[in-house]
Amino acid sequence: MTDAPNEQSLRVIVAQDRMSATLVLPAGFPAAMLTEDVCINLIRTRGVVLDQNSLTIIKGIVAGQPESDGPPREFVVAKGSQPVDGTDGHVEWDDQGEPATEEQTAELSHYERSPFVMVKEGQSVGRVVPETLGTDGADVLGATLNAKHGKPPNLSHDETVIRDASGQLIAQIDGVLHRTPDNVKIRNRIEITEYVDFSTGNINFTGDVLVLRGVRDCFTVKTTGNVEVRGLIEAATIDCDGDLNAIGGMAGRERGTLRISGNMTGKFLDNIAGRVGGSLELHSEMVNCDIAVGGELRVPKGKVIGGRVCVAGPANIATLGSAACVSTEIVLGSAAELTRIERDLLETIDQLTRKHDAANEELDVITRNTRRLTAFDRERQTELMYEAGTIKQQIDRGTAAYEALTKHLKAQRVVDMTVTMRVFEGVTITIDGLRYQILEQIRGPVWIGLARDGKAVYRQGSSADAPLSGISQVSEVAPAGK
C-alpha cells in the first residue's frame, strides 16, 4: 500500500508486506510545519500502530529537520515483528545408548564388536526435550502474525523404560536397547537372524538369546538366561545360566566348550568339553566329549562313543562305546562340580585350622610370661585372642557348609544306568573309585547300578543281578572329581 505521488507533501509509505512504515519528508518542507503532532496524526491516519520506539524516532526527525532546502529524506518510523515459530520436541540419546563409532570400533577385537546396544537397570538412555511454543508477531498495522507451535515429541515406551519428571529416560531392566524414531524399549531377549560371527561379535547378554542360524568358530555366547541355537554350533563357547537348546548340534573339534547351569537338549555333541548343571538329552550321539552332567543323561536313541562322561543322576543310553573299541569312560554317581567345591572347602578349613593353631601357640607363649609382659606383649595378646576367635568362627561356618554339602552330595549321587542296545568291549564304567573295563560286548537291555551292600551289579534283560566285576577288569582309581 503506498500513497499517491506528491513530492511536495509529507507522506507515509506502508510497505507491501506491512512490515514497515516510512515517513517521507520532501525537500524544502517548512520546518515550522514539521511537528510531532503532525507526524503522529499523519502516521496514525494510515492505520500504523506507533510504539515508544516510533515516538522516539519522530521526536528525532522533528529536532533534526534543517531550515534550508535539502534533498527528500525518508525515516522508518515503525517496524513489524516477525513471528518466531516454536521448536519440535525430540529425544537426545545418551552416548552409552549409541552404537560405537568407527574410531571406537577400530580399537576393539573383531570378536568384541557388536551391533547391539546393551544397557543396565537404572541407566539413562536419553532425555526427552519438550516442544516450545511459538511467539506471535505483528505488522505495522497491528495485525497479528501467527507463529507455529512446536510439536510434542512422538515417543512411546513400555514398562521397561520410564520417563522421569526431568524428561530422563531410565532403563528398568538389563537388556538390549531397541530404538526407533517414535519408540524405545528394552528387551531381555536377543534374536539373531543369521550367525553369531563377525557381524555380531561375541554375545554377552543379560537375558535370553535366540540364534536362528548358528555360532561360528571361536565365538562366545554368554548369557544369564536361556540359549537356543537352531543351526550348528561350531568350535565355540556357550556359557549360560539357564538352559541350552542346541537344535542343530555342536561340533567342537576339541575346541568347543560348554558351561550350562540349567538343562541341555540338542541333536549331538562332538569333541566338546564342559559341564551341564542339570540334565543332558541328545537325540543322536555324543562323540569324544569330556562332559560333567549334574542331573540325568539321556541318549535314548543314540550313541556315547569315546571321551569321558561324568553323570550324577540316572543315565539312559542306546549304545555305549563302539565296535572299534574307542576308549570310552562313563563315571556314574559323579557330581564333579560339587566334589570340587567339597575339596576346596576342606582345603580352606585346613588352612584356617593351621592359622588358628599358630595363633594359639603364640598366645600360649605370651600367656606363660604374664609377670614380665610389656605393653607391646599385652597389645599383641589382645590381637591374638581376637584373631583366634574370628578364625574359629570361620572354621565353624566352613565345617557346617562342608557337612551340608556332603549330605547333598550323598542325596544327589545316583548309580543307575540303562543301556538299551549294547555295551561294547573296552568301555570303562567308573563307580565309587573303582574302574570296571568291560571284557566283551553285552547286548541290551542292560542295567548297571548298586546292590544293597553297595557293590556294583548289572542286570541283562530279565535275568538276576550279577556282580559287574564278573564281566569286567577291575582296578582302583582316585575318587570321582579328585
Image (cartoon, rainbow, N blue to C red):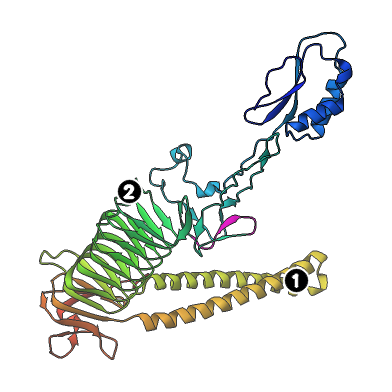
Please tell me the numbered disc located at residue 250.
none
Image quarter (top left, top right, bottom left or bottom right) of the N terminus: top right
Residue at numbered disc 1:
382
Nearer-the-camera pick, 79 or 287? 79
Residue at numbered disc 2:
197
Range shown magenta: 165-174
Whole-number angstrom distance, CA of label 1 to CA of label 2: 61 Å
The answer to whether 188 is drawn above or below residue 357 in the figure is above
Q: Is residue 318 magenta?
A: no
The answer to whether 449 is drawn above or below residue 236 in the figure is below
Rendered location of residue 200, percent (x, y): 36, 49
Rendered location of residue 353, percent (x, y): 57, 73
Q: Earlier in the sequence, mark 1 or mark 2?
A: 2
- Asked where in the image residue 479 lies, by quadrant, the reply is bottom left
**Which SS does the magenta portion mostly show?**
loop
Rendered location of residue 378, percent (x, y): 79, 69
Nearer-the-camera pick, 188 or 214? 188
